[in-house]
Image (cartoon, grey):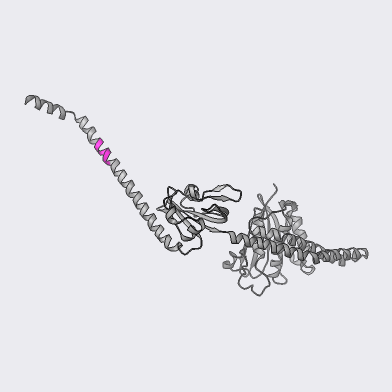
Amino acid sequence: MATHTESSSTINADPAAQQRDEQDMVDILAVNEQLLMSGLREQELAEQLQRQLAFMNAITKSMGEGVYALDRAGQFTFVNPAGEELLGWTEAELLGKDAHAIIDMRSANGVRIIPEDVPLQTLTPSDRSYRDDDAVLMRRDGSVFPAAFSAAPIVIDGEAIGAVVAFRDMSEVRRLQRSQEEYLALISHDLRAPLTAIMGRTQMLLRALTKQGLEREAHSAQIVFASSHRMNDMIEGLLDRSRLEAGQGALRQNPINLVQLATRIIDQTVLPGEHTKIQLEGVLELPVVVDATQIERVLVNLLTNALKFSPPESPVRVRVYRDGKRALVSVADQGNGIDPQDLEHLFEKHYRARGHSLVAGSGLGLYISRLIIEAHGGGIWGESELGVGSRFTFALPTMG
């Protein structure tokens, strides 16, 4: 009995070992708690994702666009009926499968795109989406079709827990674009014949008037010839314009002096009686590398708009100037101005500002101007104040 008591006393006499045992138990409990919380968090995220998918499923069932959703691991969690039809797979066959192994989407130059990676690896939760309108997607049977897609993260509590990708078949759009190009080619061909006759006869008239010393009449004939030549350039550029709308325009860029171009356009475009209204200001020389014919169209459009919407005797101010590495051209009038609600839409296709419906026009001028300037790597915008007037400005990169 004495021996037993002594042994028990020896075991209880080591408080350090007992403290270590207790700390180990605390650590084990803390780890278990963290594991439990992590599991509950994952379960909560999964449940929230399922609720979002159920809501999205109700919306996307009737959509014409294909939509699929992925979890954090890049596995399918949802595919709508349009997506099934476009991909050639049923939702049941795709659920839980790795999207990388099934989705084969490539850029126009053949490089593979993995849209489901974009929102998870490139975008932050604050980013809205990534879009590509010029892709090619392969179906299950190996056939391909032109596609446009947008990808965005599924965000819960500031954390990206998955991705949703919407895509559509662009075959009909591409067919219509080809038809448009063919139609414009025919129109261009038919317009060139009478215009060539006009240019030829005008040249003959110009030479005759010059020989007779009729300078004023010769100058008028010169303007007719220059305008005809510019119209011919515009006809030549009709196909380029259609390609610009498709993002495939080829610009014929050369170094020019933007001030000289503006001066020439004013001289050729503005009627003699309105020349006194135009006030040209700016630097003496401003070199840029542009497609001169395209920039001429933009400037002609801005000038004609300013003259069209200005009171008869009010001036139109044209400025050509430099701002850092940008060359800027602005055209300002003293017309009635534009309502702020209209101003933000003026560069949209076929948009006409309210109050100008009686003025002839198709609503394409500013839209085409925006396409041209953006194709040059520049920008165009408008500013206006009701009762004071409007100013439209475009910016282009300078040569140095």
| 183 with respect to 19 (left or right) | right
**In the image, what residue occupies the spot 74% across and 67% down?**
277
Frontmost residue, 264 versus 104: 104
Residue at 21% x, 30% y: name it.
17
Q: Quadrant of residue 242?
A: bottom right
Q: Nearer the viewer, residue 13 or 313?
A: 13
User: Which quarter shows the N terminus?
Assistant: top left
Residue 163, position as x, y percentages in the image: 46, 52
Q: Residue 239: image x %, image y %?
A: 70, 60
- The secondary structure that most of the magenta stretch takes on is helix
Is 255 displayed left or right of 146 in the figure?
A: right
Q: Is residue 298 left or right of residue 84?
A: right
Q: Is residue 368 left or right of residue 267?
A: left
Q: Residue visible at 29% across and 44% down?
A: 33
Q: The magenta stretch spans which residues? A: 24-29
Question: Which residue is rendered at x = 19% and y = 30% of the image?
Answer: 15
